[in-house]
Structures are given as structure tokens and as C-alpha cells.
Image (cartoon, grey):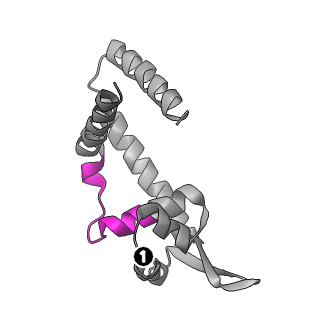
Amino acid sequence: MINDVSTQLINLLFVFKKNFLKQHSEVGVSVLSLLIFRIICDEGEIRISDIASRIKISVPTVTEYISKLEHDNIVVKITIENDKREKFVKLTKKGRMMKDNHMKKLKKSIQDKLSILSDEDLIALNQSLSSVVDILNKI
């Protein structure tokens, strides 16, 4: 059963990506930059080393991508006074605006795609997704 569920979750991710996220990839921005940006969006403020751990790449590699985001005024590095070696990163005002804008565009795109479904299909999908979210939050 675990194998079946894991396969279905992978299928769900691919279907979602194909149908909803494809047109939202940023032109000229690497997948890794977007992943790092999304982690920072989710966490608010996070250590660079924690980002590296989460996505299983080296701290210097994450730092290189963070520097590009910082150069574009999307994120800012923060040094904690009691440990100058430890760097945190968080979104700037421009970064927060980008996040909000991206979420609005994504939500609109999803609503447009869903608009072709019947009310009955929308009710069934909503109930199913609520159940999936509730169950996944237990993990």
C-alpha cells in the first residue's frame, strides 16, 4: 500500500506541475534559484546552512545563489552578533512583492484552469484535496 500511495503522490506532483506550474517558471532564472527563493518565502528567515541541508547541496553553492538573489535586491543576508560566521537570509520588500505577485498569478491561473469543471467536479476535488492535505499534515 505504501508503494501505491507514494506512486500516486508522485503522479499528483507531476500532473500539478504540468497543468499549473509550467507557465509560471521565471525566464532566465534557474530551478535552483527558484527553489531557494521558495524556501526563503516559506521560512521567512532561515540560515544559509539550513537551506543547503534541506536541498542537499553545499553551503558555498547556496551562498553563490543567495548572492545573485541579493544582488537583485530580492533577499538580504543577516549576520547574528554573537556568531559572525552564521548567516541568515530573508526576503527584502522587493522579494516579498515578487512572492505576492507570483502567488496572485498562480492562483488566477489555477482558477482559470478549474473554471472548466462542473460544480459537482469542483466539490469532489475540494473534498479530496482537503482530505489529502489533512492526511499529509500528519506526516
Give the SS element for disc 1: loop
Corner quadrant of residue 102: bottom left
Question: Farthest bottom residue?
Answer: 84
Looking at the image, residue 118 lies above or below residue 73: above
Which secondary structure is most common in the magenta stretch? helix
Residue carrying label 1: 58
x and y, in percent, of residue 114 in the image:
32, 30
Residue at image x 36%, y 15%? 119
Q: Residues within 10 Å of mark 1 (few under 14, many from 20)?
A: few
Residue at image x 44%, y 80%? 72
Bounds of the magenta span?
21-36
Residue at image x 39%, y 49%? 105
Looking at the image, residue 44 lies above or below residue 129: below
x and y, in percent, of residue 21 in the image:
30, 48
Quarter of the image with the N terminus in it: top left
Corner quadrant of residue 24: bottom left
**Nearer to us in this view, 27 or 10:** 10
Q: Is residue 25 magenta?
A: yes
x and y, in percent, of residue 132 in the image:
44, 27
**Nearer to us in this view, 115 or 63:** 63
Q: Is residue 7 magenta?
A: no
Question: Farthest right residue?
Answer: 82
Number of on-image labels:
1
Looking at the image, residue 11 lies above or below residue 78: above
Left-right relation of 68 to 96: left
The residue type indicated by label 1 comes to Ser
Question: Farthest top residue?
Answer: 120
